[in-house]
Image: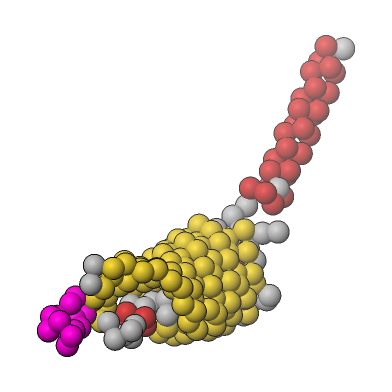
Amino acid sequence: MTKTIIITLAFLLTGVSTAVSQEKKVNPGKEKRDQSELFNDLYFSYGTGTAYYYIDNENLKANSLSGTFLIGFCRSLNKIIAVGFQVSYTNIGRSGSNYDYTYSTTYTEEMTDNLWQGIANIRFRYLNTPTFCMYSGIGIGVTMDYYNKTYNSTTSRGQKLFPAGQLTLLGFRFGRAFSFFGEFGLGTNSILNCGISYKFSD
């Protein structure tokens, strides 16, 4: 009788162990998801080379640049196309000299641009593997310039509205959920841009 009970318990324990093992194998929550299967992408980056640096504002040339700090989100529509929106901030310092013929004096004029950009964009991914993505993209939007201007010891403040746009010639993303990414392009955000990305499912 005792031997029968022991054999029965052994069978039961073996069955429970097998069931638990199978459950662990099929549990999708513990499996690493491919980046191509995660449709939402939240990213933060820093770039340099904004087109605004090379364009004079009120005949004042740029002499300092903070770079562009950017946060964005994009949503994959399929394996190839993703759409999104990004917001960025850039600070540019400008200066120049003006001659006052009335007082025969040269005054230094200084200006600080605080540029806030909002750009809607679309990406085209032509290589999309489990851990690597290569893409190009284009975006258009607007820029609000909150500027401070000092001339002849008088400071004024104001706002201007400019068009904004960014062409990403080559972008890449390396990793699964958390990853590093970099971009090369032309536009009002940057020429070179790199940062971190986090992709997640619905």
Q: Nearer the viewer, residue 119 or 28?
A: 119
Which quadrant, please, contains the C terminus? bottom right
The residue under the point 54% across, 70% down is 86
Residue 20 in magenta? no
Residue 128, position in %: x, y?
Answer: 56, 75
Residue 105, position in %: x, y?
Answer: 13, 80
Total numbered badges shown on the rendered structure? 0
Q: Is residue 5 above or below residue 176?
A: above
Coloring scheme of the render?
secondary structure
Q: Nearer the viewer, residue 113 or 51?
A: 113
Q: Residue furthest left?
A: 104
Determine whether, in the image, residue 96 is placed left or right of residue 52: left
Q: Residue furthest right?
A: 1
The residue under the point 27% across, 82% down is 60
Q: Is residue 66 visible?
A: yes
Q: Is residue 176 visible?
A: no
The residue under the point 54% across, 82% down is 140
The residue under the point 63% across, 79% down is 81
Q: Is residue 97 above or below residue 24?
A: below
Q: Is residue 165 above or below residue 87?
A: below
Range shown magenta? 96-108
Q: Is residue 67 above or below residue 32?
A: below
Residue 30, position in %: x, y?
Answer: 63, 48
Q: Nearer the viewer, residue 189 or 101?
A: 101
Res. 182 image quadrant = bottom left
Which quadrant, please, contains the N terminus? top right
Q: Residue furthest top?
A: 2
Res. 101 image quadrant = bottom left
Residue 63, position in %: x, y?
Answer: 23, 75
- What secondary structure do most residues of the magenta stretch adopt? strand
